[in-house]
Image (cartoon, rainbow, N blue to C red):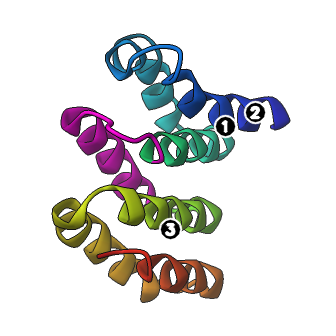
C-alpha cells in the first residue's frame, strides 16, 4: 500500500518535469485502469486523481476525465472509497474552477453528505466548504 501511496504522491510532481499531455497519454491510462474490482486499487487511483487535481493549468479535457473518475468513485459500494472520493472532491472543488466545481463537484458532495456512513458524511461536509 505504501508504494501505491508514494506513486500517487509523485504523479503530480511529474508535471514539473514532463508536460500534462505526456502524463495524460502515457501514465493516465494506468491510473484509469485502477478503477477495477479491488478496492485497494481504487483507493490508490483516488490518491493519484487527487494529486492530479492539484496540478495548476491541467488541460480542461484531462481535468474533466479526472473528475469523471472521482464522481464514479463517490458512488462506490465501499464506504472507505466514498470517503476518499469525498476528500479528493474537496481538492477538486478548490482547483477545478467555479463552473466545474458548481456543476460537477458540489452536487456529488451534496449526495455524499446524505450518505448512510457517518464518516463519509463528515468528509463530504468538510470538502464542500472548498467548493465555489
Q: Are marks 2 and 1 in contact (CB under 8 Å)?
A: yes
Q: Nearer the viewer, residue 59 or 7?
A: 59
Please identify the quadrant where the N terminus is shown: top right
Q: Is residue 110 above or below residue 89?
A: below
SS class, disc 3: helix
Q: Indicate the position of residue 2 as horizontal and vertical percent values.
A: 83, 36
Measure how far apart labels 3 and 1 are at the Cα level. 18 Å
From the image, tell me which residue sits under label 3. 86
The numbered dot on residue 6 is 2
Give whichever of discs 3 and 1 has the lower sequence position: 1
Q: Nearer the viewer, residue 83 or 105?
A: 105
Q: Indicate the position of residue 90 as horizontal and vertical percent values.
A: 47, 67
Q: Nearer the viewer, residue 78 or 98?
A: 98
Q: Residue at x 49, y 76 (%)?
A: 127
Q: Is residue 114 magenta?
A: no
Q: Is residue 101 above or below residue 26?
A: below
Q: Is residue 122 visible?
A: yes
SS class, disc 1: helix
Q: Is residue 16 above or below residue 82?
A: above
What secondary structure is the magenta-colored segment mainly?
helix
From the image, tell me which residue sits under label 1. 9
Q: Please state the extent of the stretch shown in magenta in the rendering.
A: 54-75
SS class, disc 2: helix
Q: Residues within 10 Å of mark 2 (few under 14, many from 20)?
A: few
Name the mark nearer the viewer: 3 or 1. Answer: 1
Q: Residue at x 22, y 67 (%)?
A: 98
Q: Indicate the position of residue 60 as horizontal and vertical percent values.
A: 20, 39
Examine the image and state in which quarter residue 12 appears: top right
Measure how far apart labels 3 and 2 are at the Cα level. 20 Å
Please identify the quadrant where the C terminus is shown: bottom left
Amino acid at each position: 500500500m505504501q508504494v501505491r501511496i508514494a506513486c500517487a504522491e509523485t504523479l503530480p510532481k511529474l508535471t514539473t518535469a514532463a508536460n500534462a499531455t505526456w502524463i495524460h497519454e502515457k501514465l493516465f491510462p494506468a491510473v484509469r485502469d485502477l478503477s477495477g474490482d479491488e478496492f485497494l486499487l481504487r483507493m490508490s487511483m483516488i490518491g493519484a486523481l487527487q494529486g492530479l487535481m492539484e496540478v495548476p493549468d491541467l488541460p480542461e479535457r484531462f481535468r474533466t476525465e479526472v473528475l469523471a473518475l472521482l464522481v464514479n468513485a463517490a458512488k462506490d459500494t465501499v464506504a472507505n472509497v466514498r470517503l476518499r472520493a469525498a476528500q479528493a472532491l474537496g481538492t477538486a472543488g478548490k482547483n477545478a474552477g467555479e463552473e466545474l466545481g458548481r456543476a460537477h463537484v458540489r452536487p456529488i458532495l451534496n449526495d455524499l453528505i446524505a450518505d448512510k456512513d457517518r464518516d463519509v458524511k463528515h468528509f463530504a461536509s468538510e470538502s464542500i466548504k472548498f467548493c465555489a
